[in-house]
């Protein structure tokens, strides 16, 4: 058995089709006529852009707007005058052929992105390499791999899947995907999830152990891959595949049902989104609202800040699509693990403890915060928008943000621009300080949403990315649990809504505790909505009180988790 990273859930059973990119040999040629070479480059560039546009349109119509955006991102790169200008300069000044100019310039950018370390930048590096080889192939007249006509039941095996390759996949023919490289958040993994094709990525050494036509079984949840499995394994996984499909069908029954416990307590199951296009899936899976719109995604993958107008359009689109349902827009939360190069943030010694989120926004009121708040306020005329302030640690930060909102309301009034007059301004509770003074915040803030990713990080003082200390990171740590219980009780006492938008909100072992504590809103990735709704309907909050009391009596995270595991196993 091979072990990789599960990137798209489900069981894939089929035959290996090894997809190999044609070997690209890039040779350096001295050119005598740069003008002619530039025409050659521009011709290939135009064709590559047209090809990318076709892929984007195909994806938009077959899969969704969000997935098409990946290819639109490639179009932006290909149309970036800085990139193409540098390639043209290299052709003219160094008198080299376009293939070499592309190689040097794109590699320089790709290396720069890759060296920035975080996963998003790694992905941009992969995008840059993808467009590089596509332009070079276009110049050399080589065909890119075509995966659109694989036989039914294919398990696509590749060293890495470029987004442009994945875009051509027909899910009715591809039973699974296995790659040696890639990560859970790589574009190809995102596409695999959107196409609902089971996928395992980062399977080291896999290509050496597999041949075209081999029988393959993969478990896209666990990350396990078998080559030519024995009959017993095949039978087990065939059963698991049926069960997985059955569960998926079963969950669909919960579309349109209320999220209400057996004893009649109604909660709201909402979605976390990063881009307006994500709303399609939220509606498909019947999210009852948007509990967290991570606006920083609107600022990523571009070379300058989105304008107030662009932001307004994005927020309005979400508000309109959601209608009456609440849409909580979190104001810009950058810094820490979310780097945006053009924002001019200096490297912090301790980025998670530094100049970020609301701290940054309050320091950049004129050029960053006001345009964003104005865009949100204007969009609030089109739906049920709420504003959420991240990373607050003291009430002054909240007051300043709120004062800005009031100031901007006055400004809009004087211009006769409509907005939701009673717009709520709440906070994300994700620091130990905010938790301890939750009662103070509850007197002024309109609602709370607990960011348990941050709350856990800041309570146990652990950076999740650090493997050496990761063992300490647990939301079941009694310190974090007490914090959660305290925050909920402060909110309830003050009569304000309290939600949770960190990962714990959809953890099946955590849901019973949150119900017992009295959480009002659970916000999560869209794929978890129906599963969580089903869970909620299976519990009675009254019966859960004793479970919560018992869970809170333990001394360690491991004991709590073990107890909840046993309880949930029934
Ligand atoms: C959180 O901290 O729980 C949270 C939802 O924020 P982020 O966007 O940083 O995951
Ligand atoms: Mg956070």
Image: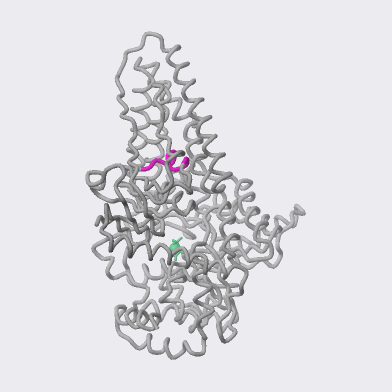
Q: Residue at x 63, y 68 (%)?
A: 424
Ligand 2 found in image quarter? bottom left
Give the answer, above or below, for where 209 lies relative to 132: below
**Taking the image as drawn, is residue 492 in sight?**
yes
Q: Quadrant of the N terminus?
A: bottom left
> Can you tell which quarter of the image residue 138 is in?
top left
Q: Residue at x 56, y 57 (%)?
A: 281
Rendered image coloring scheme: one colour
The percent position of residue 89, horizontal first and vertical second, equals 41, 21
The percent position of residue 185, horizontal first and vertical second, equals 40, 52
Q: Is residue 273 left or right of residue 317?
A: left
**302 is within the stretch colored magenta:** no
Q: Is residue 76 left or right of residue 128?
A: right
The percent position of residue 38, horizontal first and vertical second, equals 45, 17
Give the answer, above or below, for where 220 lies relative to 543: above
Q: Residue furthest top?
A: 32
Is most of the magenta stretch helix, strand or loop? helix
Instruction: Pick the residue in front: 276 or 305.
Output: 276
Magenta highlight range:
161-168
Give the answer, above or below, for where 510 lies relative to 94: below
**163 is within the stretch colored magenta:** yes
**Taking the image as drawn, is residue 396 in sight?**
no
């Amino acid at each position: 058995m091979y072990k990789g990273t599960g990137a798209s859930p489900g069981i894939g059973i089929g035959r290996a089709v090894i997809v190999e990119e044609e070997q690209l040999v890039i040779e350096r040629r001295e050119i005598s006529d740069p003008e002619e070479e530039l025409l050659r480059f521009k011709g290939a560039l135009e064709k590559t852009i047209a090809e990318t546009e076709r892929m984007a349109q195909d994806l938009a119509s077959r899969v969704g707007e969000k997935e098409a955006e990946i290819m639109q991102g490639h179009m932006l790169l290909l149309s970036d005058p800085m990139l193409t200008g540098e390639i043209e300069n290299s052709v003219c000044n160094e008198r080299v052929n376009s293939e070499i100019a592309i190689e040097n310039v794109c590699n320089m950018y790709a290396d720069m992105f890759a060296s920035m370390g975080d996963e998003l930048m790694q992905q941009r590096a992969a995008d840059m390499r993808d467009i590089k080889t596509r332009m070079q192939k276009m110049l050399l007249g080589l065909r890119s791999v075509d995966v659109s006509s694989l036989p039914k039941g294919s398990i696509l095996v590749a060293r890495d899947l470029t987004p442009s390759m994945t875009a051509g996949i027909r899910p009715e023919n591809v039973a699974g995907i296995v790659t040696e490289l890639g990560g859970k958040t790589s574009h190809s993994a995102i596409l695999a999830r959107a196409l609902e094709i089971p996928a395992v990525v980062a399977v080291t050494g896999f290509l050496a152990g597999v041949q075209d036509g081999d029988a393959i079984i993969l478990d896209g949840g666990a990350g396990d891959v078998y080559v030519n499995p024995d009959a017993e394994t095949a039978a087990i996984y065939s059963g698991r595949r049926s069960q997985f499909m059955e569960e998926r069908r079963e969950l669909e029954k919960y579309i349109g049902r209320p999220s209400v416990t057996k004893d009649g307590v109604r909660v709201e199951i909402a979605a976390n989104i990063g881009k307006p296009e994500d709303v399609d899936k939220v509606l498909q899976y019947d999210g009852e609202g948007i509990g967290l719109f991570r606006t920083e995604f609107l600022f990523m993958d571009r070379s300058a800040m989105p304008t107030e107008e662009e932001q307004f359009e994005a927020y309005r689109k979400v508000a309109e699509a959601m209608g009456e349902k609440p849409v909580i827009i979190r104001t810009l939360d950058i810094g820490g693990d979310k780097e945006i190069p053009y924002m001019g943030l200096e490297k912090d010694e301790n980025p998670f403890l530094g100049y970020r989120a609301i701290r940054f926004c309050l320091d950049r009121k004129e050029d960053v915060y006001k345009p964003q708040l104005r865009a949100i306020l204007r969009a609030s005329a089109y739906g049920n928008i709420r504003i959420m302030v991240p990373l607050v640690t003291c009430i002054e930060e909240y007051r300043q943000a709120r004062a800005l909102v009031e100031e901007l309301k006055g400004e809009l009034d004087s211009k006769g621009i409509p907005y939701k007059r009673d717009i709520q301004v709440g906070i994300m509770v994700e620091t130990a300080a905010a938790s301890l003074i939750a009662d103070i915040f509850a007197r002024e803030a309109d609602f709370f949403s607990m960011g348990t990713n941050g709350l856990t990080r800041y309570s146990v003082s652990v950076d999740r990315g650090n493997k050496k200390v990761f063992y300490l990171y647990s939301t079941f740590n009694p310190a974090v649990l007490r914090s959660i219980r305290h925050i909920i009780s402060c909110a309830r006492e003050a009569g304000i809504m309290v939600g949770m938008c960190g990962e714990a909100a959809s953890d099946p072992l955590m849901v019973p505790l949150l119900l017992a504590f009295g959480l009002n809103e659970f916000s999560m990735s869209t794929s978890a909505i129906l599963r969580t709704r089903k869970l909620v309907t299976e519990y009675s909050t009254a019966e859960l009180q004793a479970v919560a009391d018992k869970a809170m009596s333990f001394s360690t995270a491991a004991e709590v988790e073990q107890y909840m595991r046993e309880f949930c196993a029934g």
